[in-house]
Image (cartoon, rainbow, N blue to C red):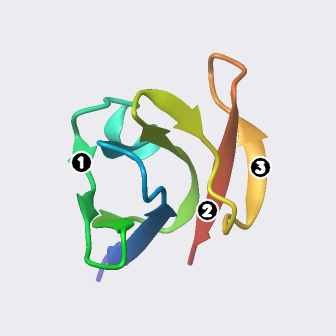
């Protein structure tokens, strides 16, 4: 039997009440701005859920086009363009 890769649904939340658009970018979507648009809820928080494999994932929020760190991230690292981005371990 081969080991099964477990995919986990991970919830992302960005508090940007004045933003007109927020997108989730990261190594899991090749940093494509349109891959994971976030939805704004009644509490003004932007959310989305992404299925991720175990490992460490680099990501950030694009708030009205500005790369923004996640204050709730478990760490900070750099992407391939040497920009500061958030780090998420998934086990």
Q: Which mark is residue 76?
A: 3
Identify the image quadrant of residue 74: bottom right
Residue 60 x %, y %? 54, 44
**Measured Cα–Cα span from mark 2 to mark 3:** 9 Å
Residue 9 versus residue 47: which sits nearer the camera?
47
Identify the image quadrant of residue 65: top left
Q: Which mark is residue 88?
A: 2
* Tags 3 and 1 touching, CB below 8 Å: no
* Tags 1 and 2 touching, CB below 8 Å: no
Q: Quadrant of the C terminus?
A: bottom right
Residue at the image point whose x is 27% and y is 55% from the top: 38
Residue at the image point whose x is 40% and y is 65% from the top: 53
**Measured Cα–Cα span from mark 3 to mark 1:** 22 Å
Neighbor class of circle 3 (other Cα within 10 Å; few <14, some 14-19, many 20+) is: some
Between disc 2 and disc 3, whose residue precedes? Answer: 3
Q: Residue 7 carries which label?
A: none
Residue beneath label 1, please?
Answer: 37
Residue at the image point whose x is 49% and y is 68% from the top: 54
Between circles 1 and 2, the one closer to the viewer is 1
Name the secondary structure under disc 2. Answer: strand
Neighbor class of circle 1 (other Cα within 10 Å; few <14, some 14-19, many 20+) is: some
- Please give left or right for residue 41 compared with residue 68 in the image: left
């Amino acid at each position: 039997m081969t080991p099964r890769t477990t995919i986990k649904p991970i919830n992302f939340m960005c508090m940007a009440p004045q933003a007109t658009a927020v997108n989730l970018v990261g190594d899991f979507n090749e940093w494509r701005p349109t891959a994971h648009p976030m939805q704004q809820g009644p509490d003004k928080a932007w959310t989305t859920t992404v299925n991720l494999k175990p490992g460490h994932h680099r990501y950030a929020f694009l708030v009205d086009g500005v790369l923004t760190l996640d204050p709730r991230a478990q760490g900070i690292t750099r992407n391939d363009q040497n920009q500061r981005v958030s780090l998420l371990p998934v086990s």
